Amino acid sequence: MQTQNNMLWVEKYRPKKIDDLTGNDEAKALFLEWLKNKRHTKKAVLLYGSPGVGKTTLVLAASQELEFSVIEMNASDTRSEKTINAVAKPATSYKALDNYTKNKTSGNVLFLDEVDGIAGNEDRGGVNAILKVIEESLVPIILAANDPDIEKLRPLKKVCLLVRFQQVRIPLIIALLQKICMLEHVSAEFEALERIAQNSKGDVRSAINDLQSLSEENHRLTLQDTMMLTSRNKDITLDDMLKRYFSAQNIAETSTMLAFSNIDYDDFLLSVSDNLPKRYSNPSELAKAYDYVSRADLFRGRVGTENWHLLKYFYNALTLASAINPLSYTPFTFISPPIRIITLFWTKGKRSTLDAICGKIGAQCHVSHKTAKHDFIPYIRVLLQKNSKSPLVGWFKFTPEEVDFLLKMGRF
Amino acid sequence: MTIVLNCKGFKLPRVEREKFVNLLHLGLDYDRNAGLFSIKSFNNIEKVIDAASDILGDDIVFLQHCIRCGKDFPCRGCNYIELCSTKNLPFSCVCPQCLRVRKNFETTYLTQF
Amino acid sequence: MTSNEEALMWVEKYRPQTLTEVVGLKDIVESLQAFMRTPKTMPHLMFAGVPGTGKTTLALAIAHTLYGANWKSFTLELNASDERGIDTVRDRIKDFSRYSRTGFGETIPFALIILDECDQMTGPAQTALRRIMEIGSRTSRFILICNQSSKIIEPIQSRCAIFRFSRVEKQAMKQHLIYIAEKEGHTLIPEAADRIVDFAEGDLRHAINVLQTASAYKEGIIDEKTVSLVIGEASPSQVQKMIRKALYGDFMDARKIMYDIMGNFGFSGTEIIRQAQREIFKMSDLTAEQKAELSNITGEYDYRLTQGANSDIQLSALLAQFAKFGKGIEESYADPK
């Protein structure tokens, strides 16, 4: 079947049943006990442990089996209290809404993945925002964190049942790889599987990815094939990745590197885009590279939450952009963190002022924020420049800061 | 000497109330009828083992449970002991024999799925 | 024409309050007046047409006609592009129909809900809207406003009487501008009026904003020079600057401007790319073929932007294509065949 062939094995073999999940039996039992019977004792549960050990898989399988609807929210997309409130609050108050529970009998759960991404960020109110969500939620909440070190998440301890996930043991990973080899008709040397499992450091996801990338081509896997596996270094920095990406001599090299890294691919994509012009000075090469990056972004957009098989094309497109002209590489300093993050950080305040201004114009002139921004602000700006004491200020109820903002705004 | 325990249930000598409460607090469960302790929460598993070995006055090693043949076996003899972050803790695993014997793997595979 | 004395923006001050005061739009107004005579028979309405052609004005005029001075108590104005999701829209409509009275008893047994920019709503949101309309139709009438009716799902269209608004006719617009200027104690030179009309491309709202801004430059006479000054000062220049930088090989600067537009002016990727599309055709140093080619490239990235995950990446990629194209132009000059 075509679609099956294109699938990532991690998705294809993601256990659909709780029993099929490899390792961490005790964590499973504790979590299920909570979900079935103990939800009244603690409103939230926090699953924590290093990546790829089955936290998300357990949540998805359990909710499927126990007929809960999962409202999923990836916390790494939402690094501020405002966004959390926007996304999590409506979800938590859906309890009474019939259309979400129509086909399910057990109700909703809110699932917040990667909470350590926000929780660590105290200046943006991360932990407090999560605590608030838990407090106000009408439905049970499942949190997951990748950081095996619980210290950062200490404030959550009081309100959450903690469930610790251990690294999956090497024999268990080998057993799982054996199973997949059998189903995919891969004949693999034991030592090869052993090496992949050892190399994964307890991360089932990365082990399966390695197996797929090494054996999918010709359905055979020898110890020799695994020699190119470089140890998965979980602390590899974005800069290291960029350096290897931009200096790659061919796409095979990039492909291997991307497959064997655990870096956040959204951040990586942004950084590649930022640094591309520093890598390619020739406009034709730059345009070609950007075309691939743009395609990678397209696939990223379409992957969404269900079309995971497209992730393969995302990596493929991203890989192609890396070696447009391998010989032209000379080392350069990287732009990081992503420009966008710096830009948005700078302008968050401005943005809300602009929103407020647009809202006031909209209220008086019956137009949307967008129309206010395009068709009114450019003129009101000039009108105020001609006369900053204009009665318009009072009519729109602009604050002195807003007037100041408009005067300094400059031309679009 | 090392004391070897099976994770399903084990006996501990009578301890004073304070220690007993602490054991339950750390995540042990106590079955009054059988007089057996079992492990309920693995959040503080290292501390549980420390406390238990303190009571027993000896090192404790838990046996592992093989998901393929169902037998209990010790971590001693495992090839991956150096890389394992959970050695000697009571989790399920696959015993060295089962891992290498393909026939055994196939029967497990066929019966289990 | 009566004027709304309190309003200080002229677009509001000279917004017609009743159907009879509306300039142009004769056919539409006549049909609507028929509904006004027996309001009970009024169906849901849909107004479709480009911006600044009187859609909101007519919707508000209907509210005035039905409910008089107290129209605000019986009218809910919502803008789909401002509201955060269909749930907010649903909640607000629910609250409104709960607390607002059901119109003026027997003769007008409904309240009015004006929902602007409906075509900005996603498919699922429109489906939800359809259900809201069904539930609400006992107590409310909807006026849906959009730019393109084709972007509205069929089931909604079939529940509405659809009225299409065309661009305001040049001569009518010119006369209206001269009338407003006179009322405000200014003389609008005909050539200056022509300049505004050309610039506004049938958007009366935009035209009136230009006129009011021009009036602030000089007391008395509004001439062509002042109008040009206003247009220059108020029309977007950053986007064109960005395109030029890219075409002339300064990709880094071009991208910097792009982030600046996004950060400082709060424009979205889509807004920038659509503006770029317009700017290309204003660039006098490009041939018609070159403009067409650039527009073609822009179109491709406009599409990708709607599908992709990061608009800044798509815009950067577009700028890179511009840079490549610019290089091509340069080479063709250096080495003419």
Image (spheres, coloured by chain):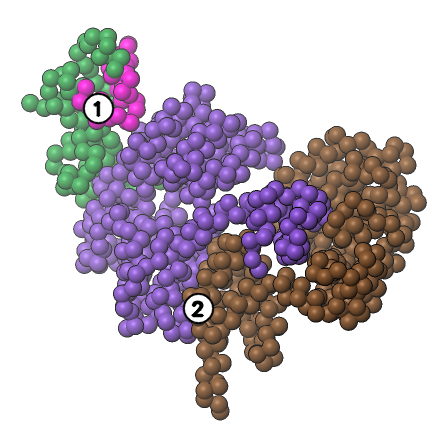
Chain colours: A purple, B green, C brown
Q: Which residue is mark 1?
A: B47
Going 26% across and 47% down the picture, which residue do you hit? A235
Image mark 1: chain: B
Q: Residue furthest bottom?
A: C337
Going 28% across and 10% down the picture, which residue do you hit? B32
Please state which amino acid type lies under the numbered disc 2: Phe
Residue C189, numbered circle: none
Q: Residue furthest right?
A: C37
Going 59% across and 74% down the picture, which residue do you hit? C283
What's drawn in magenta, residue-wise? B23-51
Please state which of residues A322 and A178 is positioned toward the viewer in this rendering. Answer: A322
Image mark 2: chain: C
- Is-magenta flag for residue B45? yes
Badges 2 and 1: C-beta atoms under 8 Å apart?
A: no
Q: Is residue C113 above or below residue A96?
A: below
Q: Estimate how packed mark 1 is, as few (under 14), some (14 to 19) or many (20 or more) residues with alpha carbons within 10 Å.
A: some
Q: Please tell me whether mark 1 sits on a helix, a strand or a loop.
A: helix
Location of residue A393 in the rendering, given as x and y in whole percent from the top left corner: 67, 46
Location of residue C5 in the rendering, given as x and y in whole percent from the top left corner: 81, 46
Location of residue B20 in the rendering, given as x and y in whole percent from the top left corner: 24, 12
Where residue A399 sits, quadrant-wise, is: top right
Please state which of residues A409 and B75 is positioned toward the viewer in this rendering. Answer: A409
Residue at mark 2 to residue at mark 1: CA–CA distance: 59 Å
Please state which amino acid type lies under the numbered disc 1: Lys
> Closer to us: mark 2 or mark 1?
2
- Is-magenta flag for residue B9? no
Q: Which residue is mark 2?
A: C251
Left or right of B95: which side holds A9? right
